[in-house]
Image (cartoon, rainbow, N blue to C red):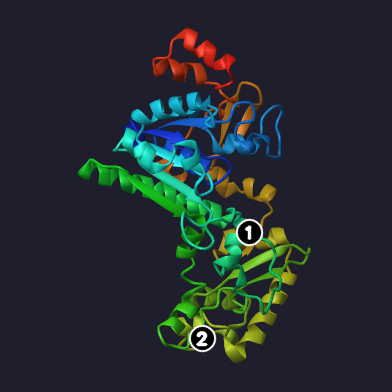
Amino acid sequence: MTLTPTAAKPLPLRGVRVLDFSRLLPGPWATQMLGELGAEVIKIEQPGTGDPSRHNRPQLTKHSYYFNAMNAFKRSITLDLARPAGRAIAHRLVRNADVAVESFRPGGTAKLGLDYQTLRAINPRLIYCSITGFGQTGPLSHIAGHDLVMQGLTGLMGTALERWNPPAPPGFHAADFAGALYAIIGIQAALAQRAQSGEGCEIDLGMFEALFNMCVIPLSSPMARMAGHSGLPRIESFGANPRYDTYLSSDGKPVAVSLLETRSWTAFCASIGREDLIPENETLADRLSAHGPHEAKYRQVLTEFCAAHTWSEIAQHLAATGITISPICTPDEAVQLPHVAARGLINVIAHPIEGDVPHLVNPLARAGLAQVEHGPAPDLGEHTDAILRELDYTPAQIADLHRDGIV
């Protein structure tokens, strides 16, 4: 990625120390991005096993690719938090921390003496972010935070049951990453607030509510009904609109059609000599509808166009004309897109064990707000002794902690 001169500026979170008690998703991705923005991140893991995502597939020579993709910019210390000596070390870490992120089930941190009230007494300036499936309170707060369940309950997966029932499992963990993004936003907002008030705060964040808050379009009709209106016709972006749907190419590969705007639909119709399909005085409501009596002929012409061209020809057509009829990529095809290379969206880690390992580049790096270069994710407990020395533990005390299985 070619950076602008702003890259020479200090990263925005330089000097911020984050304690990462989370694992899997979304906490580790959120804390990694805080590291990309310049924060120092210390990952606290269970001795012997560590974050379970260390063992996620696919595996490289020794490490999990997933773990490397979620845990760059971190130092790892192992602590048995179930034992008083382990908690004592965690409390020492809290004294000089700015942020703590945890993803235990509700009530789990209280059992370990790592709940907000306990840590706030140690460090009133601490920003404490809990990321759970459904939050700390409410009738679903005891439910494990599995992405598929949360996508189902938000209404997101139920938008087109008349066409696909049951819907396919989504290919993207939207609730996990929604929770991560709100955590990042919330932590940065809390840091700005603390700069004014001098006090930290508790962020009780449910992945369900993070995704629910993003579902403005799926929830627009029921919200309109709650306001006393019919909610109809609804905004159609779930397959009923023939100009916003998926089709098949001549070689049987999927194609996405997104011709909502009158201008793009007009350009498409003109390009295939079907000016008779260009509507007169089309309104915004018309564009977002199922197109009523026009639906069948719109769908037919799009079906025929896609079926007359190969997937590769459609990709070339998109690049040449800008008309948004696009091939749907597999993950392997997506990483090979010329646009990905041109925008510098993938970089390489020179890993001491794995060799060259590609990683995704934070898009904020172009503005100099995030680091481009990732280092390898830490080995389990790689920095334990160094961090203990920073906490003024003596060599003899460190040896005793190892002998007793505390670290």
Q: In this view, does 279 lie to the left or right of 54?
A: left
Residue 21, how many percent across, how many down? 49, 37
Corner quadrant of residue 350: top right
Q: Which of 244 and 403 is in front in this view?
A: 403
Q: What element carries label 2?
A: loop
Q: Amino acid under label 1?
A: Leu
Mark carried by residue 233: 2
Q: Amino acid under label 2?
A: Pro
For disc 1, the neighbor class at 10 Å (few under 14, some 14 to 19, many from 20) is some
Residue 108, how many percent across, how many down? 52, 44
Q: Residue at 49%, 67% (x, y): give it.
A: 215
Q: Residue at 40%, 83% (x, y): give it.
A: 227
Quick check: can you spot residue 108? yes
Looking at the image, residue 147 lies above or below residue 344: below
Quick check: can you spot residue 33? no
Which quadrant is the C terminus positioned in? top right
Corner quadrant of residue 236: bottom right
Mark carried by residue 229: none
Looking at the image, residue 267 lies above or below residue 150: below
Q: Nearer the viewer, residue 28 or 330?
A: 28
Q: Which of 45 and 12 is in front in this view?
A: 45
Mark carried by residue 148: 1
Residue closest to the far right? 251
Q: Are marks 1 and 2 in contact (CB under 8 Å)?
A: no
Q: Residue at 47%, 8% (x, y): give it.
A: 395
Residue 79, how many percent across, how many down? 53, 27
Residue 317, how many percent across, how many down? 62, 63
Q: Which of 200 and 312 is in front in this view?
A: 200
For disc 2, the neighbor class at 10 Å (few under 14, some 14 to 19, many from 20) is few
Mark 1 vs 2, N-terminal side: 1
